[in-house]
Amino acid sequence: MSSIFDPILTGGFSVGQYLLCLLFAGLCGAVAALALGRESASSRSFLISLVVLPVIVATVILMVNGSVGTGIAVAGAFSLVRFRSAAGKARDISAIFLVMTAGLACAAGYVAVALLFTLAASGLMLLLSRMPMACDRFAALHITAPESLHFANAFDDLFDRYTKSRKLVKAKTSNMGSLYKLDYRIEMKDPAEAQEFLDALRCRNGNLEIALLNDTEGGEEL
């Protein structure tokens, strides 16, 4: 009995079947781009790439279907792309794999499976991005201190008051040794007290530069 999960391609393929595969591949890419663009500040070029990528993948797979030699050549050409691009965030890499999988499914003729997979995976990404996680409580704190300040214990009372935990992860000198650059990993007791915490710190470090960052901002690259 015919089912929406049956492949639309059997043996060869016509122009209409090819265009239908491209239509569903582009639709899957658009769904993924909308989901990612809603939850992150992704660039326009990256979102456009998510829409176009499954269309390209579907066409390539259709062209090399049944040809081992051509498939190996295409795989070698695609592998060069990795060395021409910088490491991206884990979320972006996941989105790329998502649309590539959708493109492969469309190339195999399983357009309904590709669309359902994209909807399910995009919905899961949106759901997980809204769920509170333990890592959300942590932050990276960068403090610039003068050389006259004994930084080992200079901020202990403030840390005890505003944070649950803290750890000095890096300390280095700057400006010909006249300044210290201190990097801490902290867990705030109450994120709403961040401004009060920073004001207390700048009174202690001579009003030099202080930065409080989301701890995951520098740890998402793959």
Image (spheres, rainbow, N blue to C red):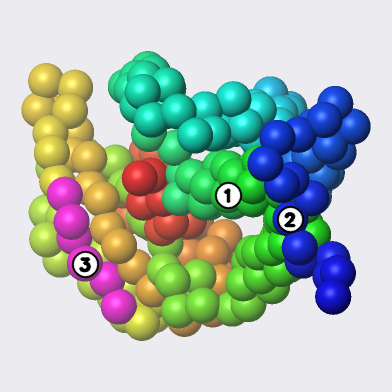
Answer left or right for 166 relative to 27: left
Identified at 82% across, 44% down, the residue is: 24
Q: Main secondary structure of the magenta part?
A: strand
Image depth: mark 2 or mark 3 in front? 2
How many neighbours does mark 1 have within 10 angstroms: few (below 14), some (14-19), or many (20 or more)? Answer: many
Of the numbered discs 2 and 3, the one sitting upstream in the chain is 2
Helix, strand or loop at label 2? It is: loop
Which quadrant holds the N terminus? bottom right
Is residue 182 depicted above or below 22 in this figure?
Answer: below
Answer left or right for 54 relative to 74: right
State the mark number for residue 167.
3
Is residue 62 depicted above or below 166 in this figure?
Answer: above
Viewer-proximal residue among 3 and 186: 3
Viewer-proximal residue among 105 and 182: 105
Identified at 68% across, 24% down, the residue is: 45
Quick check: is 33 in the magenta stretch? no
Identified at 30% across, 78% down, the residue is: 165
Is residue 217 depicted above or below 189 in this figure?
Answer: above
State the mark number for residue 101.
1
Contact, mark 2 vs mark 3 (Cβ under 8 Å) = no
Measure how far apart labels 1 and 2 are at the Cα level: 15 Å
The residue to which callout 2 is attached is 7
Viewer-proximal residue among 41 and 106: 106
Q: How many marks?
A: 3
Answer left or right for 99 relative to 137: right
Of the numbered discs 1 and 3, the one sitting upstream in the chain is 1
Image depth: mark 1 or mark 3 in front? 1
Q: Amino acid at mark 2?
A: Pro
Q: Amino acid at mark 3?
A: Lys
Measure how far apart labels 2 and 3 are at the Cα level: 56 Å
